[in-house]
Image: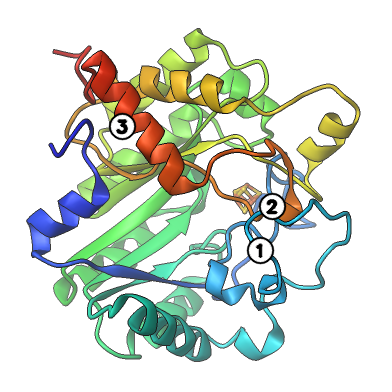
Amino acid sequence: MAKFYNSYSDYLKNKYGYKIYKVGVSAGFSCPHRDSITGKGGCVFCDELGSVAAYLRTNESMYKRNSEYEEKTLDKAVPDDLLDIKNQIKRAKTFLINRYKAEHFSLYFQSFSNTYGRIDLLKKKYDYGLSFGSWDELIISTRPDCLDDEKLMLISSYKNYLKDVCIELGLQSGSDRILKLMNRGHDVNTYMTYAEKVKNYGLSLCTHIMIGFPTESKKDLDLTIDAINNSQPDFIKIHNLNIVKDTILYQDYINGKIRAPSVDEYLNDLVYVLRRISEKIVLQRLICETPSHRLASPRNFPDKNSFIKMLDSYMEKNMYTQGDLLK
Ligand code: SF4
């Protein structure tokens, strides 16, 4: 383990000897939970723009990192001329090559639930994306209740010619009480069932969790830690709670009922989790960064690099490491 936790950049370096850059695409999928007929209203924190890769949110390009919060709503997450997967890939690769001299890529079906649809349509979209250039990995983000054996079999068939195929599953919390408050529309058990299936199909698993949801207690965090350790994902992405414009949670915020955790509160809870999860799990993300003009709370939170520095120095000063309380 490099430094104090198992970082994604070290994992890539050790596994491949080079860095792989994610090309996030918005493939026109929706989400069963937001569907006006079958859905149950969507997660209370769900923000239409949030799951779209930053370089596709061209409507936002005029905003700087510390822009003032704005009430105005942007028209569309992805402009029509970019909805085609081919254009998105071309645009993303050009950006990554120009900025980072990127040479290796993973195709990342990122926005909403990328297994929501008929099997033939899923195959068509995955094949279409993979037909543009060479790829090391395929990553598909979805909900635990939006998978079945037929879909998993299709997705695992791509292992034959890629170095890795990964499913990203949103768990968010290991506490059914918190999942209800989030209106997630699935329980912990559904996540556990499909996490196991993903692994049984030989796919990598990346689990998303959120820390700092209103009323979340140490007992709830312990349940999240248990769900992570029991399902043993290869990767996790951890997000601090962001209260974003045009979400259900935002209404509670402006009515004064809730607030997002401060940086100190988040740091403490994050370290609490890191020390109790297996040291084998690779951390892909440690902070959520919503653009300032859409972020109601927390305001003035450090950017990713500053936050990572804070976390590293806190871990070092206290001689903490990922999983040290499990030994
Ligand atoms: S599962 Fe994802 S896309 Fe669907 S409502 Fe929840 S946050 Fe939004």
Q: Quadrant of residue 314?
A: top left
Residue 34 visible: no
Using a 10 Å C-alpha cutoff, classify the residue at mark 2 as few (fewer than 14 neighbours), some (14 to 19) or many (20 or more): many
Mark carried by residue 212: none
Give the mark, 3 or 1, whose residue is nearer the N terminus: 1
Q: Amino acid at mark 3?
A: Asp
Q: Which residue is mark 2?
A: 292
Q: Amino acid at mark 1?
A: Lys
In the rendered image, the vertical position of residue 112 relative to residue 5, given as above or below: below
**Residue 20 placement (x, y as % from top left):** 25, 68
Using a 10 Å C-alpha cutoff, classify the residue at mark 3 as few (fewer than 14 neighbours), some (14 to 19) or many (20 or more): some
Total residue callouts: 3
Mark 1 or 2: in front is 1
Q: Which residue is mark 3?
A: 312
In the rendered image, the vertical position of residue 257 relative to residue 88, given as above or below: above
Using a 10 Å C-alpha cutoff, classify the residue at mark 1 as few (fewer than 14 neighbours), some (14 to 19) or many (20 or more): few
Residue extending furthest toward the right: 255
Q: Please state which of residues 279 and 159 is positioned toward the viewer in this rendering.
A: 279
Q: Is residue 233 left or right of residue 79?
A: left
Quadrant assignment for the C terminus: top left
Q: Which residue is mark 1?
A: 64
Q: Which residue appears at 30% of the width and 58% of the height?
A: 166
Mark 1 secondary-structure assignment: loop
**Residue 150 placement (x, y as % from top left):** 37, 62
Q: CA distance from mark 3 to mark 1?
A: 27 Å
Q: Which residue appears at 51% of the width and 52% of the height?
A: 146
Q: Amino acid at mark 2?
A: Ser
